[in-house]
Amino acid sequence: MQLTKSESITWDEVEVGYELPVHEREITAALIAGGAISATHDYAAVHHDYHAARQAGADDIFMNILTTNGLIGKYLTDWAGPTLEIKKITLRLAVPNYPGDRMTTTGYVTKKYEAEGRHLLEIEFIGKNKIGYHASGKAVVALPVRG
Amino acid sequence: MTLTREEIDQYVGIDSEKIKGPDAVCKQMIRHWCEVMQENNPLYLDEEYAAKTKYGEVIAPPMQVQVYTMSPLWPVAERKLNPMEHMVKLMEEAGYSSIVATEQGQEYFAPMKVGDEISYTISVDVVSPEKQTSRGPGYFITFLYTFVNQRDELVCKQTFTILAYNSIAKEGA
């Protein structure tokens, strides 16, 4: 298995305005239904049953918020490596992620600070698909310092 | 059918009893999560790597906390309805039977290790006035969750907002 590189980006290397790499993810039905049932144990019908989703006014089954949250967490550690500690994620959902979509995630550093002996960054992120913003929000992460 | 403030407020601001999740934190559920997310963080998956970190062993992805407390599809848990379930039922009976999550905030504290048992309490924090949305008329409802482990250490504080809406009453539908 190809695991994330174990050397991590350090706090020293990053300044306010730093842009995280762009990440693209194909949104498949397996990701939506598997994200709901297998990964997050969410059996709400709109995430696996096309007819139930249509009845709720959606175009197709759509991604649950816990899967979106998981993908954002992955985006952060994919970037900086496993020594990045996720302290907080706050996200708002707008348009749904449907099968056949592609989500493009971007992020940049909005704050760099120290608190309680931790070296922290605030990161604003956006997950966008072809209809618009699927998710937007802020994360707070702690990074190691050099040396 | 618009609900009165009294009908709504009867469930606001009351903590549920502590509800214990059905599964302890385990490698299987971590792997199933990682499989779907395509998550390859060695801290969640690679025992050799994790043993050398400050945790000394693999931890579950912090974003997975709520998964350990999701209600089973079957058998239906035999317990009193919690304030969230009361609120959802009230909405449903008034015609706002479709639900979509709109916001979530999670703040993480103690890491989750294999064998940890996660419990939570939940309350209804805020309910908006009825709003006309693109999905139909509905209410935005914010819940507060507190997740703890078997040692009563705080694991996560979560805010969670849903829109409960009436998709049939959507104008022009």
Image: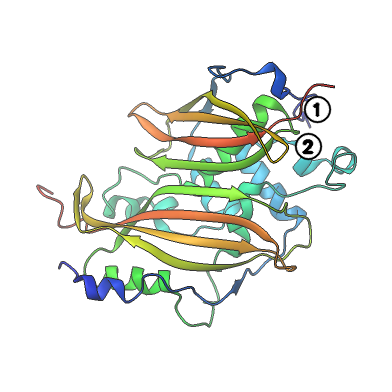
**Mark 1 surroundings within 10 Å by alpha-carbon count, few (fewer than 14), some (14 through 19), many (20 or more):** some
Q: Position of residue B41 (x, y in %)?
A: 73, 36
Residue at the spot x=35%, y=60% of the render? B126
Residue at the spot x=11%, y=49% of the render? B171
Which chain is disc 2 placed on? B
Q: Position of residue A98 (x, y in %)?
A: 40, 38
Residue at the spot x=74%, y=28% of the render? A4
> Is residue A35 left or right of B162 when viewed as pictured?
right
> Is residue B31 left or right of B169 when viewed as pictured?
right
Q: Quarter of the image holding residue B143?
A: bottom left
Q: Where is residue A70 in the image (x, y as percent from the top left)?
A: 57, 42
Residue that label 1 marks:
A6
Which is more toward the observer, B67 or A142?
A: A142
Q: Do the residues labelled 2 and 1 touch (CB within 8 Å)?
A: yes
Secondary structure beneath dot 2 equals helix
Residue A33 can be seen, yes or no: no
Q: Distance between the residues labelled 2 and 1?
A: 8 Å
Residue that label 2 marks:
B42
Secondary structure beneath dot 1 equals loop
**Mark 2 surroundings within 10 Å by alpha-carbon count, few (fewer than 14), some (14 through 19), many (20 or more):** many
| Relative to A134, residue B127 above or below | below
Which is more toward the observer, A46 or A89?
A: A89
Residue A3 can be seen, yes or no: yes
Three-letter code, disc 1: Ser
Three-letter code, disc 2: Pro
